[in-house]
Amino acid sequence: MAAPDSPADSELVEKITEQVEEWSSNSNEALHITLQRQTDSGPVELAIFHPEFTYPIYGEEESLFGYKGLKIDLTFAAHNLRPSVKITYDERFKQMGEVKPSDVEEPLREFLPASAFSSGLELHAQEETPTEPFRPPGTLMHSYTNSEGHKFEIWCSSLADPAMRTMLNYMQILVPLFIEGGSLIDLDDPQWTIERWKVFLLYQVHDTPNPSPTESPYALLGYSTSYRVFALPRPTMAELSSSTRAPYSGHALESELISPPYPQATPLDLPSRERISQFLILPPYQGSGHGRQLYRTMYSHLTSAPNVLELTVEDPNEAFDDLRDLCDLAHLRTIPAFADLTINPNIPKEKLANGHYIPTDLIVPESLRTTFRTATKLAQRQFDRLVEMHTLSAIPSAHRSTARITRRENSSADYDRMYYFWRLYVKQRLYVFNSDQLAQLDRQERIERLEATVESVRVDYERLLALAEKWASYGGVGDGEVGVSALGSGQRRRKRKIVDEDEDDDEGGDGDRGADAILGATAAPADAAEDEVTANSNERNGAKRQKKI
């Protein structure tokens, strides 16, 4: 018998490896997604593309064994996303003992309706012959035309609508294919839970002068879902910072629930947050301004209800972070008083003495911040970052250097003092956000982490501000958008292990990360904050951009 490491064994292992590779297929490459529009003259393929991920369906290796020339055709009717699956291959491996080909079809059944596997199913066939042209479920919220004259519409429907539930059931497989870590919506939840959900559908409307019942002008380009969550009233900054509090004599929540300031008919009328859950622009249509249009429409609609306190986002990826930042910043800048907001360069020296807290209210007036945030219903975390970003833009780039602020508040140039105070302002937020980590570090390490974190924040803000300028220079839809795909997908990476404090259910998702939700309740001393705070492990910086601080 040959020794374990003999040439014969090595040759056998090499042959087995070659055979496995010969009969293996990458499931991402094998799966072809087609959008097909039915016309009276026959089906028209609008787009063919591959998924970002298939590991939720076919396992971590994203590999299928036992086929040569494997092709999985997943075809969707463009108007209602009714799916059809066809699996073909050139050759199939003959089972040898326990070694057998992978089951290609069965894993798909977990994510697709049974009708998708019906033998001989025509894509445009309906369970009942349609008598009228297709109309998207819900209400038309917004329409726009791009520079090429193509028309687009955004519709919104409640999941309480049976037609919308059917359509979402068709398209839910897009979640594991494009949204990393995304989960399917349980369509069998009780009615009151389903009513919390809304679905926004983004369509291109093709020129069809006289559409027939079997021909639809609508072709889906993307969609997004949101749901409403109950929100407890926030304590005011004065209540949080007060050193003496009156004995409990009944919380304001009690009277608010008993006699709410708005007509209450259902639980959806209680104080709530709207939370964006899934957001997907299909790959062929990314980078063309459609994500911008969809987000703005959602923001406008979801924040319009008087009992909705703010709009939050569930686990956004980097691309969606950028899209959201740019849209929210552009919206805030339409408010003249916010557009004029700058860092105050003249802070009394006694407010900066050792032992004093950073005077953030003097740097950027808290009353203005509260007014803007309440009016726009942006999440606290998101709004604070946008204030920092906007006020940085008012400081010329030549003055954004630590070399110019060695004299700190005594710098002779207004812009130099503004940059010094801007850094203090940012560090106050970071100090609060990272208070738990601070306690575990010695002073010198806190100083080093502080400088690295503030610098990376500045660099990222400058990147976003440059994108904002490009956005402002483009005339219409179809130009210059960040390539946004889906919440949770981002750049290619495996299941996210980081759980953002953003997702604290008690605080309502994005914008409320732990201690940062009570900005001002804890403060960094003015003499220490310039060189003390810690960088959070989720900070997006340089080559390794992750979550925002």
Image: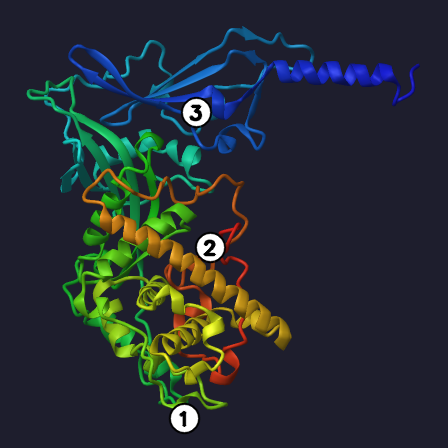
Considering depth in this image, is 213 or 548 the residue closer to the camera? 548
Secondary element at image label 2: loop
Residue 337 is tagged as none
Residue 34, given in percent of the width and then of the height, sits at 34, 21
Q: Is residue 148 above or below residue 208?
A: below
Could you tell which of marks 3 and 1 lies nearer the N-terminus? 3
Q: Is residue 275 visible?
A: no
Left or right, 378 with reference to 67: left
Residue 334, given in percent of the width and then of the height, sits at 18, 61
Task: Give the amino acid type for the residue marked by disc 2 in the picture.
Answer: Lys
Q: Is residue 306 visible?
A: yes
Residue 39, given in percent of the width and then of the height, sits at 18, 15
Could you tell which of marks 3 and 2 lies nearer the N-terminus? 3
| Residue depth check, mark 3 versus mark 1: number of the one nearer the observer | 1
Q: Is residue 241 above or below residue 329?
A: below
Q: Residue at x 44, y 59 (%)?
A: 459
Q: Residue at x 37, y 62 (%)?
A: 511
Number of numbered discs visible in the structure rendering: 3
Residue 547 is tagged as 2
Task: Give the amino acid type for the residue marked by disc 1 in the picture.
Answer: Glu
Residue 76, given in percent of the width and then of the height, sits at 31, 23
Could you tell which of marks 2 and 1 lies nearer the N-terminus? 1
Q: Is residue 78 above or below residue 245?
A: above
Residue denoted by label 3: 109
Residue denoted by label 1: 350
- In the picture as drawn, the residue positioned furthest to the left comes out as 210
